Amino acid sequence: METVILLAEDEKKLRDMTAQHLKQEGYKVALAADGLEAIHYWQELQPDLLVLDLMLPGLSGWEVLKKIRQKHDTPVIVLTARADEVDKLLGLELGADDYITKPFSPRELSARIKAVLRRSRPQEPSALISFHDLRLDPERMEVFIGDVLLKLTASEFKILMLLAGNPGQVFSRLYILERVFGDMYEGYERTIDTHISNIRHKMEAADNGQVSIKTVYGIGYKLTAGE
């Protein structure tokens, strides 16, 4: 089955050049020139991955990402024209799985796409992971607290799976970063704080009281039984 990539980019020359390269890489590519088209084609095609420019006309990339994350965990790589760290961290906080700063090479984008798809698709079935009322199904990429299904992004799922598979063990930000994202995020350990914050909010919204992610100051994070 072909891997479908939705590319949302309003700059025609860049959009066409990038699409051509991705097609040569073997992907089926759908194109959107603005935010409304991006939402339309995402709903219609349910792509395997979305490459999303943040500065889209009509509906910004930020708004597109918010709408998608309200319904689905489709892997998203955001494109930003700014090298500002705040932009990058905000994109991750909203649920992006990776970012790439313009200008970029098609080869670099291809590498990022392969890495994100690899992280979002478990390579082989794994046993269920449970800790108190928290249950993770790695094969289906589903997380339950009691009877409540948590809507996690692929990156959030990977982080929680690492912690839940080793309850009580403290993991440094750098270790989590390398295990979940690989070396492409070197120097951005703070992104882990953002993902952990998102996971905590979703766990709290499920009225969870048995399991929590604790901060071990100066070191990292661990999953423990609730207070």
Image (tube, rainbow, N blue to C red):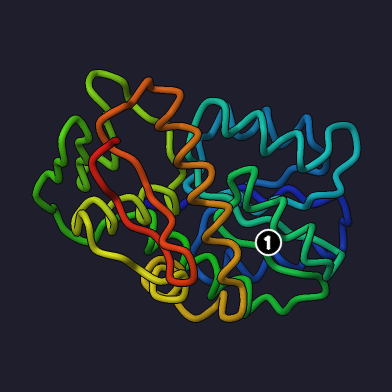
SS class, disc 1: helix
In the picture, measured across the screen, residue 143 lies left or right of residue 128, that is: right
Q: How many marks?
A: 1
Q: Quadrant of residue 86?
A: bottom right
- 104 to the left or right of 193: right
| Residue under the image location 40 percent in, 66 percent down | 180
State the residue lying farthest toward the front. 227
Quadrant position of the C terminus in the picture: top left
Left or right, 146 with respect to 148, comes to left
What residue occupies the far left of the structure in this picture?
127
Above or below 155: residue 34: above
Give the quadrant of residue 106. Answer: bottom right
Residue type at numbered disc 1: Ala
Tell which of 186 and 9 is nearer to you.
Answer: 186
State the residue at coordinates (55%, 57%): 193
Where residue 41 appears, x then y in whole percent? 64, 33
- Residue 118 coordinates in the image, percent (x, y): 37, 64
- Mark 1: few/some/many CA within 10 Å (<14, 14-19, 20+): many
**Residue 143 x, y percent position in the rendering:** 29, 35
Give the residue drawn at x 81%, y 70%: 102
* Residue corresponding to mark 1: 19
Residue in the picture at 69% in, 55% down:
78
Q: Quadrant of residue 205?
A: top left
Q: Depth check: give the residue in front, 84 or 50.
A: 84
Is 130 located above or below residue 204 in the figure? below
Residue 52: x %, y % from top left:
70, 50
